């Protein structure tokens, strides 16, 4: 069974631009969560999607948004990029997620560098 | 506000030794706690998940314990190997459905 895939793996953008990252979950998984990882703040939860609906959201500004498609694939968008948005963005999929407590499977991440 | 702390931030241990990694959290009203491993530049791999009603979980050489009342969890690694070198993160799922991660312990097993 294929794992979680994320594209692109590496991305370089400049301040003010926008970016879209993609995540394909494991087949059959309906929950996709996104995380930002930086050396200073560690791993922080961005949001979770389940059945095309955002079910939960972390404490990030509105510049960070996402969506989920009917095949459970998810995209994350960051508008008006700032230097501080440079990070490793990870997505994770699980069967149903949330308080069900099922295991999350992580993708390899997208390394975003903002110049 | 839930805070998750992992001490030490880094640890070096000779191969073959048993070791314990620590995780503490400030709000005991958690739904579950999970231990992950992250290799450099890669995503996370789930190691063990402990539901709030459980006290421990075991998988091979790994054993994770949970003491909700004291806000602590430990990850015990038996007979460490160089391949265990990685960063280990613990994460708690709060009852508001938000997951909070610790900053991890960077483990280096010396051959």
Image (cartoon, coloured by chain):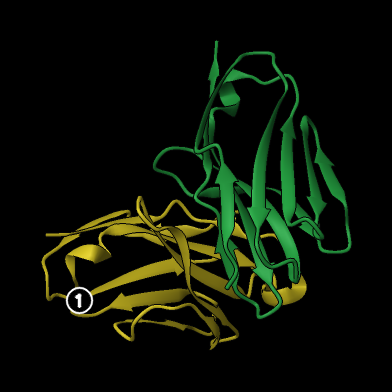
Chain colours: A yellow, B green
Question: Quick one: label 1, few (<14), some, or many (20+) residues within 10 Å?
Answer: some
Asked whether the viewer can see residue B46, the reply is no
Tell me if residue B93 comes above or below residue A113 in the rendering: below
Q: Quadrant of the C terminus of chain A?
A: bottom left
Q: Is A97 on the left or on the right of A23, as rendered?
A: right
Q: Position of residue B31 (x, y in %)?
A: 76, 69
- Residue in the picture at 39% in, 42% down: B41
Task: List the residue tagged with mark 1.
Answer: A18
Can residue A105 be seen by looking at this rendering?
A: yes
Residue drawn at the location 26% of the way across and 66% of the way down: A85
Left-right relation of B19 to A93: right
Q: Residue at x 52, y 58 (%)?
A: A4
**Picture coordinates of residue A7 (x, y %)?**
35, 61
Where residue A13 sits in the image (x, y, percent)?
Answer: 15, 64
- Most foreground residue, B7 or A52: B7
Choose between A11 and B29: the one closer to the eye.
Answer: B29
């Amino acid at each position: 069974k294929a794992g979680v895939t994320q594209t692109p793996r590496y991305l370089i953008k400049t301040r003010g631009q926008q970016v879209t990252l993609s995540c394909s979950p494991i087949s059959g998984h309906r929950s996709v969560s996104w995380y930002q990882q930086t050396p200073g703040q560690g791993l922080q939860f961005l949001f979770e999607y389940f059945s095309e609906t955002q079910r939960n959201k972390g404490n990030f500004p509105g510049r960070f948004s996402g969506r989920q498609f009917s095949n459970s694939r998810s995209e994350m968008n960051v508008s008006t990029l700032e230097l501080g948005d440079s990070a490793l963005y990870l997505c994770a999929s699980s069967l149903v997620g949330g308080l069900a407590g099922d295991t999350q499977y992580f993708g390899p991440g997208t390394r975003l560098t903002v110049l | 506000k839930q805070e998750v702390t992992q001490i030490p931030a880094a640890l070096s241990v000779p191969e073959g030794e048993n070791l314990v990694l620590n995780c503490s959290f400030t709000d005991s009203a958690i739904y579950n706690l999970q231990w992950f491993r992250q290799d450099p530049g890669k995503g996370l791999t789930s190691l063990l998940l402990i539901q709030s009603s459980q006290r421990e979980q075991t998988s091979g050489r790994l054993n994770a314990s949970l003491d909700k009342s004291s806000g602590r969890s430990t990850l015990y690694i038996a007979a460490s190997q160089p391949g265990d070198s990685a960063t280990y993160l613990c994460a708690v799922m709060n009852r508001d459905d938000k997951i909070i991660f610790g900053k991890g312990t960077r483990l280096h097993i010396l051959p």
